[in-house]
Amino acid sequence: MKLAYAVLLLPTTLYAQILGADSDIDQLVAQMDTSEKYSIVNGVGWISRKQQSGYYIGNEPAVDRLGIPSIKMQDAAQGFRTTDERIIGEVTAWPCSLGVASAWDVDLMEDWGHALGKEHRAKGANMILGPSVNVHRVAKGGRNAEYLSGESPKLGEEMARSYVRGVQEEGVMAVVKHFALNNQENDRNTIDSHADERTMQEVYYPPFKAAVDEGVASFMCSYNLVNGTHSCGNEDLLVRDLKERMGFEGFVMSDWWAVNEVGYQNAGLDMDMPGDDGYFSSDNLDASDDGRIDDMVTRVLTQMKKVGLLGTDDQPAAFPNLCDIPGDCDDLFYNATATSAAHEALALSIATQSVALLKNEDDVLPISGAKTIAVVGSACDASNNISAMLKVWDLGNYYVMGGSGRVIAEDPVSIVRGLQEGAGDTITIVESTTDDLDQALAAMENADVVLTCGATTSTEGHDRASLLVDQDDFITQLVEAATIPSVVLLNTPGATVISNFSGKASAVLNMFLGGQATGTAWSNIIYGVESPSGKLPVTFPLSEEDAVEPCSSSPCTYDEKLEVGWRGLVEKDVDFPFGHGLSYTNFDYEVKSKDGLKFELNVENTGKSAGREVVQLYVTYPVAEDAPPVELKGFKKTGVLEPGQSELLEFDISPDDLRSWSTNAGDFVAVSGDFQFDFASSSRDVRVSDTVTV
Ligand code: BGC
């Protein structure tokens, strides 16, 4: 039912009063009867855990009488989820969210947000079930590929903000997830994550808080328990921490079937999804605390209005409703083409910019001139078995992750295809795309350089069994045997252990699961069309023992407290540190001016080719017993700098960023003393330091 029709049903003046006045949402809610109110806080479209034809992954019905359109939700982590075969190819299979974050470019993340918003709208959806922002605690975490914070609350803050802004400016509500402490997939429904308040506030909440500050429409509470209580029925989490302390004015929806008992609405849950569990039945909602139902409904409608989904007869909705479920959306959902040449180009650009060059001995890369390249190994020609994937929702491959974030690519470009297509006239490629060492050595006989590929995937529902790539043995033997320079290209879903071969290889590069443009992006980097400019948002440790394992029993106590990810490894050797990523050129840093907490830093390209640099600011707190470990507090990416060209980057740190959580005060409190500011090219490559007294 369309808004225009609803408008006809209301006397014009009344309608204008309802939606035009300041307290318009209050007035609209006052017009609703109880069943209408109940209908928009409980999902429809699922029966006995089966999604019904003609419905999205998540659905709230329209209230026709009042011109309130339906809410139509779809995942998220690599684009518009391909829940039906017909959708494949109609939407872009983007790089995974962690890949987008690994470009460390807030503008690029915002561009992606806009593109996601546009594709969701083109498919009739007005809500995206993203961003996924949990800070990685467990290196093997099955969903780390979609968690855009990597190991850093600060990276997560910046990326979450840009994503939410981009998506919501397209008239699509964003849902930040999974709140909270959803750091592993094994036993995700029963694991009880225990963390102290300071750890939650300083490590795990910041990306969520940034989304609140950016006006995110919704939060998704997670499957796990937090400090003894399931997240979706956890009043401390949803009311005290989220709605009161963070000031969240939007609505909290449950993860799918994450409601385990009646009464969660009285603990802060505003919407039960997907709605077929009976917990938000009329009888159960009748038992809500006074005023709660109106609060829940107000929260939903306020967010719809804010992103432009509700209009008045005087002022139409900025983003008019395109269709309503069920039935009316089928054509868009199944048949509309949402991808475009512009989105394909953006997917390629993101994948290219996501690549981190981990090592490059003797400048073996980029490859140019008359060369013969051996491309060896099965992962260089990764398959994309669509029919197998359609049968199993949590099957990933080397292009896309498994689970609800999956967007099956119709015809992803394999690495070898990308390299062939980009080779030009002077480069000859000899391929052997199996993991047979003899065949690989034969292919290498007359080659100048060998490229091999390592990959692994991951999925929602369980954690990775190993941090190695699936071809670890083959690559290790190959680089041992190679008498020509060897280059290893990795497609991974998160932190990976590559120490068996990284020492011997001449060059190593990482791209997180790269979506449809994988091979073309590799070609851009390998042939030097672009210099690599991505940085690792996670640590590549020397061994699995250096990483936190998923818990196998509850409670799962976060003993490492603030020393999460790279911050827990500062005293240890690692293979490749957090923030690391080289370029084909070099950069010099110089502090040009300093005014309180404001720095201007000049970055000059002192090398021989064009490139971009990500400057990272690491801050060490004044010495004190309870001082937090060194932390990333800011980062800036330059534009493309030609040789000899410079750019002035401004770092304007807010005093709020230098506070620390006080459990006694129940708030962040100022810390005074000498702070060390390190401007760095990675967490272990500091270029310029200064001291700031606060
Ligand atoms: C996932 C959510 C997702 C939902 C709907 C759940 O299994 O945890 O992230 O949005 O399904 O697909």
Image (cartoon, grey):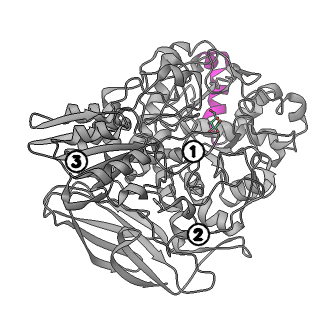
Query: In this figure, which residue is indicated by the disc labeled 3?
Result: 530
Q: For mark 1, give the secondary structure.
A: loop
In this rendering, the answer to whether 210 lies above or below 2 is: below
Q: Position of residue 673 (x, y in %)?
A: 52, 87
How would you rate the neighbour count of disc 2 (Cα within 10 Å): few for under 14, some for 14-19, many for 20 or more? some
Q: Residue at x 69, y 61 (%)?
A: 245
Q: Position of residue 557 (x, y in %)?
A: 72, 62
Earlier along the polypeptide chain: callout 1 or callout 2? 1
Earlier along the polypeptide chain: callout 3 or callout 2? 3
In this rendering, the answer to whether 437 lies above or below 195 is: above
103 or 395, which is in the foreground? Answer: 395
Q: Are marks 1 and 3 in contact (CB under 8 Å)?
A: no
In this rendering, the answer to whether 665 lies above or below 166 is: below
Which quarter of the figure has residue 205?
Answer: bottom right
- Residue 213 sits inside the magenta stretch: no
Query: In this figure, which residue is indicated by the disc labeled 1?
Result: 143
Amino acid at the residue labelled 1: Arg
Amino acid at the residue labelled 2: Glu
Q: Which residues are magenta?
A: 5-22
Q: Are marks 3 and 2 in contact (CB under 8 Å)?
A: no
Query: In this figure, which residue is indicated by the disc labeled 2?
Result: 563
Q: Residue at x 84, y 46 (%)?
A: 266
Q: Residue at x 59, y 58 (%)?
A: 137
Q: For mark 3, give the secondary structure.
A: loop
| Mark 1 Cβ inside 8 Å of ligand 1 | yes
In the rendered structure, the answer to whether residue 94 lies left or right of residue 148 reads left
Please say whether residue 332 is visible from this viewpoint: no
What secondary structure is the stretch in magenta mostly built from? helix
How would you rate the neighbour count of disc 1 (Cα within 10 Å): few for under 14, some for 14-19, many for 20 or more? many
- Residue 7 sits inside the magenta stretch: yes
432 or 150, which is in the foreground? Answer: 432
